[in-house]
Image (cartoon, rainbow, N blue to C red):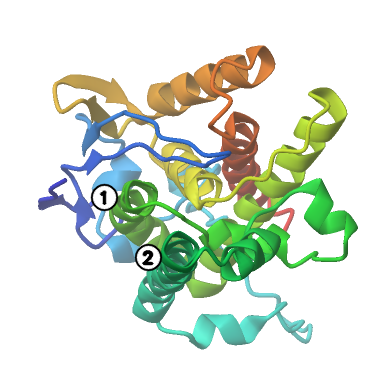
Amino acid sequence: MSASLIHHAFGRPIFSILRIQPLSRRHISKSKISVRITPSLPLSPILRRPWSHQRFFSSTPLSQGPRSYLSRPPQSNRPRKPQFLAFLDAIPQNQVFYGILAINGLVFAMWYMSTERLKQERNPTSYKWMKDNFTVSWRNISEGRLWTIATSCFSHESISHILFNGFTFFFMARPVLSMIGSRQFIFLYMGGGLAANIASVAWANLVKGRDNGSYGASAAIYSVVSFLACVAPKMTFQLYGIIPVPAWLVVAGIFTYDTYSAINDKRRTTDTAGHVAGLLAGMGYFLGRRFRIF
């Protein structure tokens, strides 16, 4: 995977050439998609302006001055209500970015050590503890381990799994984090992961009649990717580094493929229902900010 910084779509360089290894969210899963991203031309005027003059999600004519939907307009003569978890915005964006990667790496190391202990000592205690606390399933939830809805968003057991998701996060998260800030990015990432886990458990138990535990960061990352595609739908994804496809079409294709797979059980080792929920969460977040619902 490689990246070159040649495009200033959001006021600071966007990674304009990305080879994204496939996101994999597991029952256990391994996808095999390679995507390369370059900015599409021509860009919309809003993406060509310097960062200091950009107003995302504007709907009013430029002659009247576009209004930003990323932040609420100041309200004069009214005391400003404190924002929910406002302290999160005080966290530097680099700390959020590398912190998420570090947590994923730490949980992977825990999986690795528990697996090695199981192989070498024939002691399943550590491995069972990881399955009980870092995979999401109806069994874990019904037994009171509600935290697994969140911890599974950082959980990867195999090296290929964490590399696929880690590399994708590394290249896709930065522009979104720069746009919306630390607090909202954490809401987007965790919100996408939580929504996907709840949807995954509901789908597996209520629709398919089975309780497959799942884990992985791909649904949370998909929420970031779909949000970015909503903001810059004409950004070009070069599939396999050759075929140029607009971002909106790539996301639509992933959504269609995973929806089909979830309904027809075509990829049982992949939590396709979680993927779909993650994509929808990112789109929902975009619409929520666009229409100032939150």
Q: Which mark is residue 9?
A: 1
The percent coordinates of residue 143 (x first, y second) are 88, 61
Q: Is residue 290 above or below residue 261?
A: below
Q: Which residue is painted at 47% across and 68% down in the image?
A: 121
Answer with the quarter of the image where residue 99 lies: bottom left
Image quarter where the N terminus lies is top left
Q: Nearer the viewer, residue 154 or 64?
A: 154
Q: On the rendered structure, is 50 left or right of 183?
A: left
Answer with the quarter of the image where residue 263 lies: top right
Q: CA distance from mark 2 to mark 1?
A: 11 Å
The residue to which callout 2 is attached is: 178
Quick one: SS at disc 1? Answer: loop
**Looking at the picture, which amino acid does disc 2 mark?**
Ser
Quick one: SS at disc 2? Answer: helix
Crowd class of label 2 (few under 14; some 14 to 19; many from 20; radius 10 Å): some
Q: Which residue is painted at 45% across and 28% down in the image?
A: 251
Q: Which residue is painted at 16% across and 42% down in the image?
A: 17
Q: Nearer the viewer, residue 90 or 159?
A: 159
Crowd class of label 1 (few under 14; some 14 to 19; many from 20; radius 10 Å): many
